[in-house]
């Protein structure tokens, strides 16, 4: 009987001695795995931030304004309340408006497009000046995004407002030309 307790006490000591190298090896593998995972996560964070910075830099680039106009005054002036807000893509909204935003109305004032947007409870305005020879990619993108996402009714209202101004200007010009001709002044028009 005394042999069994002696053998059991050796077994208790030996498994500890043989498990220690395995445990240390497992710990080293575990630490290496955690270290690899941590470095992978940090690389992923860096790559994501670089992508975000590249996108911001791209949107900030200035390009020739394809919609360049200059207006002699702010005579052409109207505002349209949108039937449904236009949600700007998330990152574009953050870069342009400082947060995710929805456009609630659009206005034309001379050679400027004014977008009224909400950022929760307050309403702010964002102006795109079309009288500048160069615009940022962000301004062009926002303008095109909003105009291409107008509802059919809002797009019709926008076009009708512009047509009303154009027709009114053309009619007045014709009246002036007729008046001048009636008094013998020849106009090359």
Image (cartoon, helix red, strand yellow):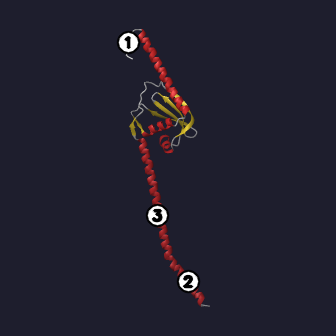
Q: Which mark is residue 186?
A: 1
How packed is label 1: few (under 14 Cα within 10 Å), some, or many (20 or more)? few
Q: CA distance from mark 1 to mark 2?
A: 121 Å
Q: CA distance from mark 3 to mark 1?
A: 87 Å
Q: Work out whether 138 lies above or below 30.
A: above
Q: Quadrant of residue 138?
A: top left
Q: Quadrant of the N terminus?
A: bottom right
User: Closer to the observer: label 3 or label 1?
Assistant: 1
Residue at 59%, 90% in the rendered image: 3
Dot 2: element? helix
Pick whichever, 10 or 111, lies toward us. 111
Q: Work out whether 5 lies above or below 110.
A: below
Residue found at the very far front of the displayed protein: 152
Pick whichever, 122 or 59, lies toward us. 59
Residue found at the very far top of the displayed protein: 183
Q: Earlier in the sequence, mark 3 or mark 2?
A: 2
Give the image location of residue 65, x and y in percent: 40, 34
Q: Work out whether 76 lies above or below 60.
A: above
Residue at 49%, 29% in the rendered image: 108
Q: Which mark is residue 148?
A: none
Residue at 47%, 17% in the rendered image: 172
Residue of label 3: 35
Residue of label 2: 11
Q: Work out whether 11 lies above or below 86.
A: below
Q: Earlier in the sequence, mark 1 or mark 2?
A: 2
Give the image location of residue 147, x and y in percent: 50, 35
């Amino acid at each position: 009987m005394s042999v069994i307790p002696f053998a059991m006490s050796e077994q208790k000591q030996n498994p500890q001695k043989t498990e220690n190298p395995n445990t240390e090896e497992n710990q080293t593998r575990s630490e290496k795995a955690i270290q690899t995972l941590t470095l992978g996560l940090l690389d992923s964070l860096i790559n994501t931030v670089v992508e975000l910075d590249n996108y911001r830099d791209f949107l900030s680039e200035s390009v020739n304004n394809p919609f360049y106009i200059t207006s002699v005054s702010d005579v052409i002036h109207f505002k349209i309340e949108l039937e449904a807000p236009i949600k700007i893509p998330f990152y574009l909204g953050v870069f342009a408006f400082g947060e995710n935003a929805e456009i609630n109305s659009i206005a034309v004032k001379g050679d400027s497009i004014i977008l009224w947007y909400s950022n929760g409870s307050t309403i702010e305005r964002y102006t795109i000046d079309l009288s500048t020879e160069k615009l940022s990619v962000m301004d062009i993108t926002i303008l095109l995004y909003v105009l291409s996402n107008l509802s059919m009714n809002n797009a019709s209202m926008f076009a009708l407002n512009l047509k009303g101004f154009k027709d009114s200007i053309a009619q007045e010009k014709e009246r002036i030309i007729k008046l001048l001709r009636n008094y013998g002044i020849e106009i090359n028009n």
